[in-house]
Image (cartoon, rainbow, N blue to C red):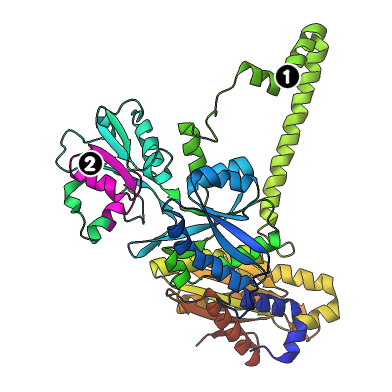
Amino acid sequence: MMNPESLFRCPRRCGQILLAVLALSAFPERDVSAHQPEVGIAVLAHRGDAAARASWQPTADYLTRTIGTHRFVIVPLMNATIGPAVAEKKVDFVLTNPGSYITLETKYGVTRMLTLRNLRQGGSYTEFGAVIFTRADRHDIQTLADLKGKSFMGVRKDAFGGFMMAWHELRAAGVNPHKDFSRLEFAGLPQDNIVNAVRDGKIDAGTVRTDTLERMAAAGKIDLGQFKVIGVRRHEGFPFQISTRLYPEWAFARLPHVSDALAQQVAIALLSLPPDSHVARAGESAGWTVPLDYTPVHELYKELRIAPYEDYGKISVLDAARQHWPWIMALLVVMTVLASNIVYILRLNRRLRETQQRLEDSNVELQRLSTQDGLTGVANHRLYAETLTREWARAIREQTPLSIIMVDIDRFKLLNDSDGHRAGDECLRQVAHTLAQALRRPTDLLARYGGEEFVAILPGTDAAGASGVAERMRQAVEGLDLPNRGTGGLVTVSLGVASAVPQRGASAEALVESADHAMYQAKDAGRNRTRLAA
């Protein structure tokens, strides 16, 4: 435990702990006033307003209680109304499917913050797809190409998982759903209607979201043996029958006018939501995770020429003139002044390429700096937090151990006081480099936790393995022979190790606190040693 004297020596760390405790309190006691500013969360209500509120109002209430400065409300909207609401700033956040999200991102500049961990058949998944199927006794339908001339059914023309995913795969197989089917029908929701229509022979083939067939079979509504999946795909770790590529789940996004402070509070609160809480269960989810890459959704819309990409790749003469009129004028000048202007244009192009290269180099450097500690060169606290969240979720899903090592430089303040901050900074750099060298697996991460403290995340490593790594770290730092003139000895470190196989409902922060407590036990026992949390 941290004594009062150490509180004054490390105010930055204490502030970080206080902020983490406040952020991760699931239901803090706050007085929520009806007069507090209202924050609207638009939800794509494909199953109706009542269902949307039943699923997501508990999440809004949770945010109201947790953040305490705003009152969050759910605003159910449809595909036709969600765009205008965003354009007119009638809402502040959006919870919608991937197709709707990329449309809002492209048109109105909304930014994804989180991706839903959807709860399906007892597991949580951040990606989904679609299944294309027919009756098992349809021997005339074996491949996607065999669907030409057949009747086909989906949910809606604009349903991402209920038609567009299948359309994408059909197009790749040379089938145009709008021309090559004898009949194309849309049954709407629930998707069970499509499955029943195929089973009863009313339609030749259909498409539904992944897990629909398994869900109906588990409920005793169908026998999976009656159906045959067309264009079967395999995705590692994805248990449901599928005919398409995988795409990220629903996105939680912010509008451009939302402040960074409020967006950060919302993100922290939702990431802290326990996966087995009644709030998560109401939305049929296991909570939220860091946002996935929605580029595959953009690519699907581009290939299918769906709004906002309906004119993608097309350009009229007038558009070309508007976009390239400087080049047209330059060409006229070149034809007039001949060689002198050709040289000028070549120089201009070279400068442009150089500028673009500098911009690319700057972007790479900015990306590096955003995840790297400026002094020591190891990962910063932001990358540490993102990695801990990701690896904790992976360890829960795969039931593998996860270990944390907390490291603190012994009597670092005395070194700073005696030799100055420059010597202290150089000590931090050398110790950080040595600790990082002691981690030999690419999946391990060393980060600067704050001040003279470092933290290591070791996925898939049990207590014995983590203790061995920690001891290797300690010996490596001791072997540097760095003098600490404030103590008359050498620079050493104290380390605390904690390891667990995470269970649902457990907290990653609790594991970090155990490692931190073990580190202070090492200091109390005389420093320059390793302690394993009990």
Q: Quadrant of residue 319?
A: top right
Classify 10 Å Cα crowding around label 1: few (below 14), some (14-19), many (20 and above): few
Q: What residue do we see at 55% from left, 69% from top?
A: 61
What range of the chain is rendered magenta?
188-215
Q: Is residue 196 left or right of residue 384?
A: left
Give above or below for 458 relative to 228: below
**Residue hosting label 2:** 134
Q: Quadrant of residue 431?
A: bottom right
Q: Which mark's residue is nearer the viewer, 2 or 1?
A: 2
Q: What residue do we see at 72% from left, 35% from top?
A: 356
Q: Secondary structure at mark 1?
A: helix
Q: Quadrant of residue 171?
A: top left
Residue 55 percent coordinates (x, y): 45, 62
Callout 2 amino acid:
Thr
Instruction: Please report contact status of discs 2 and 1: CB closer than 8 Å, yes or no.
Output: no
Determine which of the numbered discs, if any, sits on residue 325 in the image: 1
Residue 211 magenta? yes
